[in-house]
Amino acid sequence: MLIPIDSCFLASESGSPMKTKDFYSVCCLTMLALLLFLPLSCSRGRTINTLSFPATPAVSTVERFALVIDPYISMRDQPGKDGITISHGRRGEIYSVSGNRLVQGDKTTVLWINLGTGWVAESSVQLYSSMDKAKTAAALFE
């Protein structure tokens, strides 16, 4: 697009002249529309405190096995620090995973794993895709 200094017309790519006043009007309207919609796209919404993943292999822990890696764990009746202890586990024990859930804490998000007998933080276990792999890893703790 060419803007001649001594003319009040702009040459568009198609070659037809366009008045400078019309061009600036279109630019101003475009900028106004952008300024009106910008605050809407950046507004603060609600935060998500808990997420449950669908049963897809990419993010699911279902049909997996958890090997306890901490010396001693407390399994809770619900995910999160508010759950009460209902069972215990020891290093080297293997459990079948029956679910998972992300729980938002004060400043962190923690993945909790359901071992069937209770919920534990993901940092207390290692997940394996088969029982054989979990047993092989458990042998290292003996």
Image: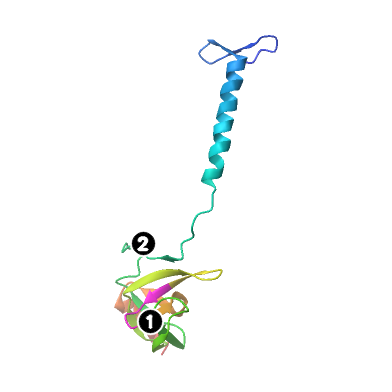
Residue extending farthest right:
6
Tell me the amino acid under the disc marked 1.
Answer: Asp
Task: State which tag comes first along the sequence, 1 or 2.
Answer: 2
The quarter of the rendered structure image containing the C terminus is: bottom left
Decide: few, some or many residues near mark 2? Use Cα within 10 Å; few <14, some 14-19, many ≥20: few
**Res 58 label:** 2
x, y (%) of residue 107?
56, 68
Q: Is residue 83 visible?
A: yes
User: Height in image: 14 above or below 51?
Assistant: above
Q: Which residues are magenta?
A: 112-117
x, y (%) of residue 60?
35, 66
**Residue placed most toward the observer, 48 or 115:** 48
Count of marks, rendered view: 2
User: Height in image: 34 above or below 84?
Assistant: above
Q: Residue at x 54, y 49 (%)?
A: 43
The quarter of the rendered structure image containing the N terminus is: top right
**Residue placed most toward the observer, 40 or 125:** 40
x, y (%) of residue 109?
50, 68
For residue 8, side relative to residue 104 (left or right): right
**Residue placed most toward the observer, 42 or 58:** 42
* Callout in the foreground (1, 2): 1
Q: Which residue is mark 1?
A: 77
**Res 61 label:** none
Q: Residue at x 29, y 71 (%)?
A: 63
Q: CA distance from mark 1 to mark 2?
A: 26 Å
Q: Residue at x 43, y 81 (%)?
A: 83
Decide: few, some or many residues near mark 1? Use Cα within 10 Å; few <14, some 14-19, many ≥20: some
Residue 61 colored in magenta in the image: no
Which type of secondary structure does the marked residue at label 1 adopt? loop
Q: Residue at x 70, y 13 (%)?
A: 5
Tell me the amino acid under the disc marked 2.
Answer: Ala
